[in-house]
Image (cartoon, rainbow, N blue to C red):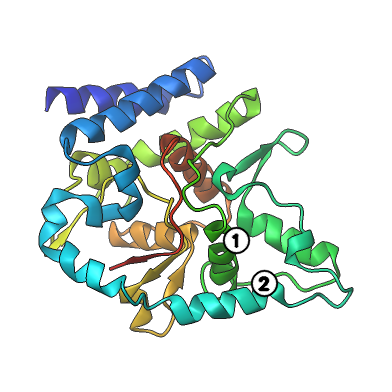
Amino acid sequence: MKKLVSLAVGMGMAVLTASTAQAISEAEINNDIAEFQGFFLKRFPGVALEDYVDGVNALPQYAHRRANWELMMDFPPYEPEMEKAEEEWSKAFANGKGFDDCNLAPANTYPVYDEASDDLRTLVADLNACLKANGEKPIKNVKRGKMARLIAHYKSQFNDEPMAVDFSAAGAQAWYEKGRQFYWAKRGQLNFSCADCHVANSGNSVRGDVLSAGLGHGVGFPVYRTKWSMSGKPWGTMHRRYGGCNKQVRASPFKAQGTEYKALEYYEAIMNTGVPLKVPSQRQ
């Protein structure tokens, strides 16, 4: 417990004074990665870094359900949707070009810091920018449906590639600070942070479910979720899940693809440095 408190102080509480403190350095971010990953590797000693691609299914506390999940993966429920995704990706634009002509970064390097605009490029934004540049209408719903399927199709081509997000630029490090602060700051009526559930209580049960580890978050997204499939909208991007998490702690969700969630996605992607992609994935 003392080490957990130390981790929270070192990686979270210090962030609250980021506006007055000296900007974080690349070396400090590398240290954050080592501490974050080291915490989980020690907390769950039988789970290797690459195992975290399976989310909560990788944790020993979820072992009693893993067999059912493995049976489901013999005939994944998302297979017909992935066939649809391939068709959507392959459909040519009116000008004869297509998604293969888009200027996209490798999937394992998103979000990408753009120094010219001092902004983060997400895969969602890059796909919509490509559509607009080719005279097509951008996809309005950036949380589920077609956008999620397109992302799943693109990312699946980079499966097993380890996460390798660049944070070498000073501007990128400022975005990292924003994301780190969001992850460790408490919010909502329940006064919970992302870390309260997915670091301090990772592997613990709540309402009959097991809380996933923060390590591995994002490498399987977009996900095909059983809970979402009940309403006929099974696919979800990272920002859809972020909104749901905020609602669960009784906090107002932020706008998908807004500053807050882009920074959070960036922070989590960097914490997952070295963890391979595994898309699509199925979650409860």
Q: Check disc 1 and report its element: helix, strand or loop.
A: helix
Identify the residue under disc 1.
154
Task: Look at the picture and state if 77 lies above or below 245.
Answer: below
Asked whether 47 or 235 is in front, the reply is 47
- Percent from the top left, x then y, of residue 209? 16, 62
Who's the residue at 23% across and 68% down the image?
69
Task: Evaluate if marks 1 and 2 touch, with contact meaning CB atoms under 8 Å apart.
Answer: yes
Quadrant for residue 207, please give it. Answer: bottom left
- Percent from the top left, x then y, of residue 277? 46, 50
How many numbered tags mark residues here? 2
Identify the residue under disc 2.
89
Asked whether 33 or 65 is in front, the reply is 65
Taking the image as drawn, is residue 189 in sight?
A: no
Query: With 239 as the anchor, is 126 left or right in this view?
Result: right
Quadrant for residue 227, please give it. Answer: bottom left
Q: Check disc 2 and report its element: helix, strand or loop.
A: helix
Label 1: how many Cα within 10 Å (few below 14, some 14–19, many 20+): many
Mark 2: amino acid: Trp
